[in-house]
Amino acid sequence: MLSLAWLVPVFPLIGSIVTGFFGLRIGKDAVGKVACGSVALSFMTTLIILAGLVMLPEEHRIYEQVVFTWFASGDLVVDFGYQIDPLSMVMMMVVTGVGLIIHIYSIGYMHEEYSYYRFFAYMNLFMCSMLLLVMGNNFLLMFIGWEGVGMCSYFLIGYYFEKKSACDAGTKAFVVNRVGDFAFLLGIMYIFKEFKTIDFTSVFAAAPNTLIYGGEAVTLITLFLFIGATGKSAQIPLYTWLPDAMEGPTPVSALIHAATMVTAGVYMVARCNALFMLAPMSMMTVAFIGGGTAIFAATIGMAQNDIKRVLAYSTVSQIGYMFLACGVGAFTAGIFHLVTHAFFKACLFLGSGSVIHGLHGEQDIRKMGGLKKYQPVTYLTFLISTLAIAGIFPLSGFFSKDEILFHSLVDGNMILWGMGVSGAFITAFYMFRLVFLTFHGESRVDPHVHPHESPKVMTLPLVVLAGLAAAGGLLGIPLIKGAHLLHHWLEPVFSFDMKAALDASAQMMIKEGHHVPAWSHLLEKEEHGLAMEIGLMLLSLVIALSGITAAYFFYIKYPTLPDRIMQGQWGYELVKNKYQVDEFYDATIVNPAIEGSFFLWKTCDAQGVDGAVNGVAKTIAWFSDQARAFQSGFVRNYALFMVVGFIGFLIVVF
Amino acid sequence: MFLTLVTFLPLVAAGILAFIPKENEETIKQTALAFAVADFLLSLQLWADFDLTTHKMQFEFNVPWIETWGINYHVGIDGISLLLYIMTTFLTAISILASWEVKKYIKEYMMAMLALGTGMLGVFVALDFFLFYFFWEFQLVPMYIIIGVWGGPRRIYAAVKFFLYTAVGSLLMLVAIIWIYFIVQDKTGVYTTDLMYITQRLDIPLSTQKWLFMAFFMAFAIKVPMFPFHTWLPDAHVEAPTAGSVILAGVLLKMGTYGFLRFNLPLFPHASNEFLPLIAALSIIGIIYGALVSMVQEDLKKLIAYSSVSHLGFVMLGIFAFNHYGLEGALLQNLNHGLSTGALFLIVGMIYDRRHTRLIKEFGGLSKQMPKYAICFMIITFSSIGLPGLNGFVGEFLVLLGIFQVNLMYAALATSGVIFAACYMLWMFQRVMFQELKNPENMKLPDLNFRELVLLVPIIVLCFWIGLYPQPVIKTFDASVAHLVDQVNPKNFAPGGAVHAELKPGHAANGKSEVKE
């Protein structure tokens, strides 16, 4: 059953080719069927593979399949190979499952589009790339997927290519991602230099015996990889492309810019846990960048008025949580949040799409309000997902976020926990601000627009996703022994033997004649009581509820209050203008680069280098002109030169 | 003999064309194309018969030419030259098909094109200094004519500049060749210009190596072109007709990198190692400088020309990594650049044929009007950016991996090129193909016709092939690259060491097709 793995990315690839090349000929209905059908086949194959993997004994749950050798040079051999293990399985389930739901939704959402086929061709190609990313058994195959999803994201952000803003956003996304890829590539090359292989299993198995704990090599490798992750997963300082990416159609935002692609960085870090565990400095960086992004993006989310942009900043912030978890070594918690986030954020985005659809393209929440009576299904599903993201018991977000906060305190420190908790408060606040402004209160909708509920093909996916968002927490029930399914499932991937690694490092250091520092404190596990765990849970619940209450006060009870308070406040302006980060980048990087390039071209190249060449040519021409004077054509002159030359020759010789 | 046949077939075809009356334009074009395609197919046979296990020259043919000076007609091919050779026949055929719409002097144009083909092929197979120099100078003439007669408004300036630049470099090379000739004569007592013979026996002190290296370096660096010898390239590209640009980018620049592989590295291994920092610095400057200048170009052809400076920087860097990855990456990147940039010039040529302008600001929104064109352009754009799955990536990665083994800083600086490549290509693509279709002159542009598709589709297929399954290509390089890596390994060129001791003077190389080790 596991040997079917290679088929999983092939189905969407075929779908993409069929819809892309024959889309106009076969018509819209057929395009929709082919596109969704191919993803459905992928999903079903994934289920079969899951069954196959479950049946294996726990310690053997890893299956590698080499389709062919992609390329080999010297001792570098790169296989086009897949690795099925618990971690990639989780990702495959999320990608194909959520992907299928969003594909179905798109049939309704994109129905009026002329280039419907183009949209589905890109979407299917995206599925194929994303599956390669999560299924690859080595760093370079992962990189194919990594770049492939980037390319599809570029196409889909710029789907409305006649709009300049959409094109700009697409180009920006690709270029910013490339900054991350630059570091990712360096990381891969560094790994090859140290390990002489780039296969996951070999690298991770050899890591403790090759790299010294906290050494330069492993720190640089992991930092390079992490910079790559910040690009794809929109973390500080490379997050600026994601809010702009909302120019793409809403299903794209749901699939690529919320549920799957942007979490690829988290997957990559989790996949490389064996490396990151060896690099405490990098782990700290991951945790602080994650926590910092979580709170930073959340504050921006408070002051945005575009429904999709609020969700975009929310995504940036939530991925920050996932990195926070990874950074404190709670990889399971990070992946858990990745899964639940895929459910509720996809639902939120599709819900916002349903709202936009119902309002004929309106995205400004100041022109919404009171929509719950027109769009009851959308409202209800949106509300459930909002409660989930805010972390209200017993919805999925509660479990996953709470686990992250718990670990950030126990395995991290107070600062990280503080970041997480304040982020949680802000999240609850801005998400309910969004719900209240969109669905509650007086209608501020343009009187010419008549809001309506979306068709079944769109609301049904919402219901399914809302159900998943509500029940997803069952994957990881805390406190009760053995009930944390995900933890148990992922254990083989994330079981890192710290003691053995430290021993190996110590031996390597002794061999090199270095002093071995005292590492024993790293192995001590702090005991924490059950009471503390429950206490923290209640605390985060209280914090979420207070965020909701605050939003209620500001946007339901006293709707005029926000304007009065915020007017002229510099803090509000700063947040509303997104801390001017884009402007800062433009002023410090983009514009100098363009102006500098003009200088290089007009001054260095045209005047400097070419000027020098032309100068040489002119000098030679000048000398030639002088020399021409001798060629006067008069025989007597030539005779004179001959005599002068002959005398000169005699003088030189004698 | 077969190799000679394939090499000279285009020249023969040019001779045949001379006898066709110039009114029969269709016959002329068809004959030229038929010969070019036949030559390409014949060259594929070379690949089929190629022995992958050896680094030795294959299909060798060696006869005395000017016996008194020890000059032979010695040709042969190995893993380094084979695919460049095949790419040359391929691009010659493509170029001839791309020139279907040339209006004036079509007969002379086709003759020049075919003669150019033989000139370029000769460069890649010549195994004799004199023969190499002969072909090296020979191919200049038809290219000079192609730019000078069929070029754009400033064609004379560009053609002269192209000619002079190359000629200056070649003169230095000639001096170096003569010097080597006498060194060898002095050491072994044999008058010979045989490259294989000399490569095995040339044993000179570092100081001499450095001088000779610099002389060859000038000739090849101008051709590549490396920064700061690149300024002839934008002018030549902008003025050259489409097919001229394709050949220029696809083959002529590769003659420079090929020169480094065939001459500088094996002949002067010690000097090569000594000059590594200089070459790496120039290559890295080229990568970044070319990309930045490319970003702000207003003329499409200039943009692609500067991007070539950037791409060739990668190739040079890979060569001077002196390891397996770097060299194979460089060879692969040579081919990739030929395909992608060749295709880009074709694509620009197609739009130029329709609009008679190449200024980016004249375009915008063409995707809507020309969807097939848009797809082809997009694929080639991503291939040029180096997207994994397309041809550009594997070569680029191997080059970077190779230089990474040498120096982390070099690798980091060079890798930044992947960011800039995305900047200039995608920004250009956006302004030409996306955004609103505003210019009324662009509203009625016809999409690609059948001939144009026939030009682009084979290149696109090759792009995917090399991107997804480059093994057959890389394997072709393997043995020769391994040998070259050995040659430049500092362990193996101890000056005056025991390796050369058993060589006795008087061992004639003349007229022998195999030189014993």
Image (cartoon, rainbow, N blue to C red):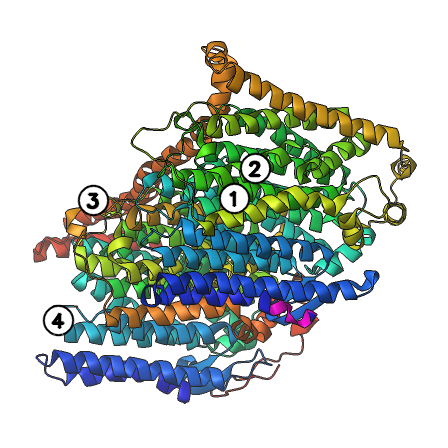
- Label 3, residues with CA under 10 Å away: few <14, some 14-19, many ≥20: few
Amino acid at pointer 4 = Tyr
- Residue A229 in the image: x percent, y percent? 61, 44
In terms of secondary structure, what is the magenta stretch mainly?
helix
Residue behind mark 4:
B105
Q: Going by the picture, which residue comes out furthest to the bottom?
A: B1
- Residue B237 in the image: x percent, y percent? 28, 56
Q: Earlier in the sequence, mark 2 or mark 1?
A: 1
Residue behind mark 2:
A315
- Distance, label 4 to label 2, CA atoms, is 63 Å
Which chain is disc 4 placed on? B
- Distance, label 3 to label 4, CA atoms, is 37 Å
- Distance, label 2 to label 3, CA atoms, is 36 Å
Asked whether residue B280 appears in the rendered view, the answer is yes
- Residue A511 in the image: x percent, y percent? 88, 49
Q: In this view, does A647 lie to the left or right of B287?
A: left
Which chain is disc 3 placed on? B
Check if residue A5 falls in the magenta segment: yes
Q: Is residue B450 left or right of residue A542?
A: left
* Segment tinted magenta in the rendering: A2-6
Which chain is disc 2 placed on? A
Label pair 4/2, CB-CB below 8 angstroms: no
Amino acid at pointer 1 = His
- Distance, label 2 to label 1, CA atoms, is 8 Å
Q: Name the residue: 73% across, 45% down.
A: A474
| The label number, if any, that marks residue A257 in the structure image | 1
Which chain is disc 1 placed on? A
